[in-house]
Amino acid sequence: MSVRDHMMVAHSLRGEVFGPAQALHGATYLVDATFLGSTLDDHGILLDIGLAAGALRAVVADLGYRNLDDDDRFAGRNTTTEVLAQHVADRLAEQVGPAGLGGGRVSRLTVTLHESHVARASYERAV
């Protein structure tokens, strides 16, 4: 099952490979989180959609409306779309692990950040 949210951030990317994105700029990401597992509970649910949406909202709210260049969690790292997808996936994994939301039924998750209508990056991990 999947849920969707969005976040707006400011950041700059170090390195000539990033061209004009080296300057401070804003980005709005559409964020999809897909939760995967091989078992359902007695009600036919892998993970309650409302709980999943709330978990994703909390993670992206923690990043939104911030200059990520000033965020110590990303010190020394470029906050590329891939890095942000990994960060969101890691925070969600903490919430849906064996003792968390979903009762341990979620075994994998994928987070996709859409940076435009033609470009996106995903990060997949085990829970």
Image: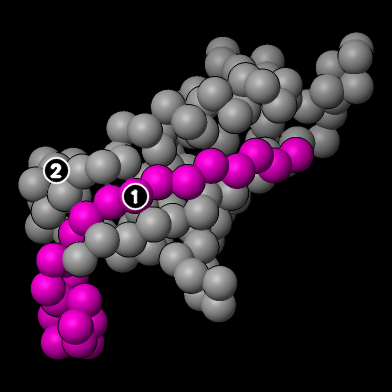
- Identify the residue position indicated by label 1 in the image: 8
The answer to whether residue 102 is above or below residue 71 is above
Relative image position of residue 50 (x, y in whole percent): 66, 22
The CA span between labels 2 and 1 is 14 Å
Query: Taking 31 as reference, is 28 left or right?
Result: left
Disc nearest the viewer among 2 and 1? 1
Between discs 2 and 1, the one toward the N terminus: 1
Q: In which quarter of the image is residue 76?
A: bottom left
Picture quarter with the C terminus:
top right
Q: Which circle marks residue 71 in the picture?
A: 2
- Residue stretch rendered in magenta on the structure: 1-24
Q: Name the amino acid type tagged 2.
A: Asp
Displayed quadrant of residue 39:
top right
Q: Is residue 46 above or below residue 10?
A: above
Please say whether residue 117 is visible from this viewpoint: yes
Amino acid type, callout 1? Met
Location of the N terminus (image quadrant): top right
